[in-house]
Image: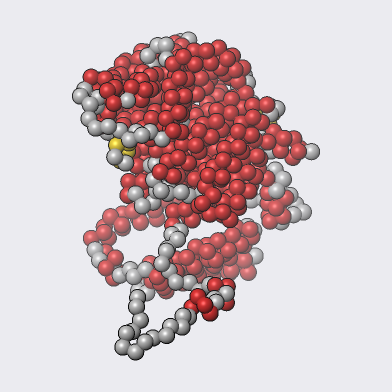
Amino acid sequence: MDLNLGLNLALPELIIAVGALVILVFGAFRGDKGMTSVSALCGVVLIAAAYFAAFVGHGTAFSGSFVIDGVAAFAKVFIYIAGVFVIVLGQGYFDRVGNRRFEFPILILLATLGMSMMVSAGDLIALYIGIELQSLALYVLAAFRRDDPKGSEAGLKYFVLGALSSGLLLYGASLVYGFTGSMNFNDIAVAAAANQQTGLIFGLVFLICGLAFKISAAPFHMWTPDVYEGAPTPVVAFAAGAPKFAALVLIARVLMGGFEDSIEQWRQVILAISVMSFIVGGLGGLMQKNIKRLMAYSSIANMGYALLAIAAGTEYGVQALLLFSVLYMVDTLGMFAVQMSLSRKGQPVENVSDLTGMSKISMPTTIVITILMLSLLGMPPLGGFWGKYYIFGSALAVEGLWPFAALGLAASVLSAFYYLRILKVMWFDAPTDELDKAPAEAKWIAYGAAAFAFPIAMLALHWLDPLAQMAASSFGLK
Amino acid sequence: MTLMAIAFYIMALITVAAGFLVITAKNPVHSVLFLILAFFSAAGLFVLLGAEFLAMLLVVVYVGAVAVLFLFVVMMLDVDFSKLRQGFANYLPIGGVVALLLMTELIMISFAVADRGAAAGNEPQAFTADATNIETIGRVLYTDYVYLFQAAGFVLLVAMIGAIVLTLKHRTNVKRQDISKQVGRQRKNAVAIVKVKTGEGIKE
């Protein structure tokens, strides 16, 4: 009967897992001709999973390795929805580049399965297997265009550095297990509260380093620009949002669930990584000419802000993390959708200099990019501003964190230069050649993201804010 | 007890000797064969320790899969091993220092274990008295750990899909035998009877 309860709680994961297997067989019989129907089926599976994830009961299952609480449910719903949009983007993209492969949507499905394992991980093995499932699918997706040398390079770099980070993570996990005698986060918390050993903190630091790789926080960010530049754009649109959301939730769960009483120890580590991230992200982006590389540095900086909310270690911090991640995911999805929709004579627009005089060529695109850039920059009253508002609010509420919040604000002013440079190039420089006609699905997703960033986010927050608060309260923190 | 000791010394000696021969054998195929011998005798050591499941895993995974894969790689790739051995004398000093350090560590650990016993000084013991290791693992694998076991299966599935996606190429212009096509071939599609007039030949 225990198993039945577990299967009920894991209903969204079961839908995705069984769906992926069935669709894989279907795809294998239909071949690459059937990519459209495979994509459609995968989208339906994800929507169904998102629906059940929102309404499934809370509890723990499978001897504590699977936890469903408010935070897990909240994260899952948004990760599944992001997956649907990425499948739509990918379908159009691979159609246009003439590389139709039915495995693409299935790998996205399996990656979301890994992510939902990550956000509901209740012990160290589930954490590791979730991360591996997610990253392995993403390594393959990054190298999906195997004839493209940059794509293969991106895939290989992602794979090798990801394997290294898994090694760090496993080493940390083995130390934690050795010093506490348990894999389960709750038991670890009990053991850690009873006896604060140096070896345990040592293991925790390795664990944090391995996880920081996955969210591309400095100093573990070196793979990010190359992978963003080389991997196919829909894959980047996915990798920039959903896996990072899942990894952030996972970090919050490990630190606040398993090491609640060691907060003084891990807060220093998280703060150091956070400050380094937004400084590296702010400075690194200044010299970038390629839009995707620039977005990579922007994501490094934004992960720094997200870690600030984790360093706060409060319920409000978790709430801020959830809201920030959702708003950031929408912005990046929109930005990469815009980038996909722009091409000139069949060549994708990749450099900032290709955007010159965009306001005279295509007004709607210019407005969309402007809104998304200002939102990423954190200009009030756009979506990104509210994310940062919550983050800095949560950091300021904790005694002694204000210098780090101030540093974060300074770094965000620094990074404003590169966002504003794009706006200047688009609005005030002389126009170049005409653009090709934008593909419909990328254009509309970009419009939708921009509309969300500007007026809708303010209205949606009235509804998202209490939801995130309710979710965050399930951690049982102060 | 003496029988156990004799078995231990024989297998330990074979393991060390085989390990030494792996790196000194001239022929790379012989190296791989000695590696397999080393795996087998290490498996024997595991059996002596009472870890029969690990012994089986070692034989199945390392000998059955990994070593055979090595053998394939060594035989398929044209690697010039005499070239790889060049510069042996140059790297000898640094290699010797590392080897010496490792040796010292091993000796120190051996003395520490002999002095205080392994890990926390506990003898390894069976989880339940009435069941072997394999039975115990089998009992929890599909009950307590069913979630993780199935999830690990999905990781392997992703690896399989990935390998196919990244390497499978459907080559066009390859002539394959298609029996149904051969059998279904009609006379009128294959042969045309043309009346050729003298001195004109056939057009086309």
Q: Residue at x 72, y 55 (%)?
A: B135
Q: B113 and A164: which one is in front? A: A164
Q: Residue at x 74, y 40 (%)?
A: A3
Q: Residue at x 42, y 18 (%)?
A: A384
**Residue A451's image quarter?**
top left
Q: B163 and A120: which one is in front? A: B163
**Residue A319's image quarter?**
top right
Q: Is residue B104 left or right of residue B11?
A: left
Q: Is residue B154 above or below residue A264?
A: below
Q: Position of residue A192 (x, y in %)?
A: 57, 28
**Residue A434's image quarter?**
top left
Q: Position of residue B203 (x, y in %)?
A: 34, 78
* Quadrant housing the C terminus of chain A: top right
Q: A258 and A224: which one is in front? A: A224
* Quadrant housing the N terminus of chain A: top right
Q: Is residue A430 above or below residue A413?
A: below
Q: B56 and A197: which one is in front? A: B56
Q: Position of residue A460 (x, y in %)?
A: 53, 16
Q: Residue at x 61, y 27 (%)?
A: A73
Q: Which residue appears farthest toward the right when viewing the image?
A: A1
Q: Is residue A316 visible?
A: no
Q: Position of residue B85 (x, y in %)?
A: 28, 66
Q: Which residue appears farthest toward the left when viewing the image?
A: A430
Q: Is residue A252 left or right of residue A373?
A: right
Q: Is residue B153 above or below residue B203?
A: above
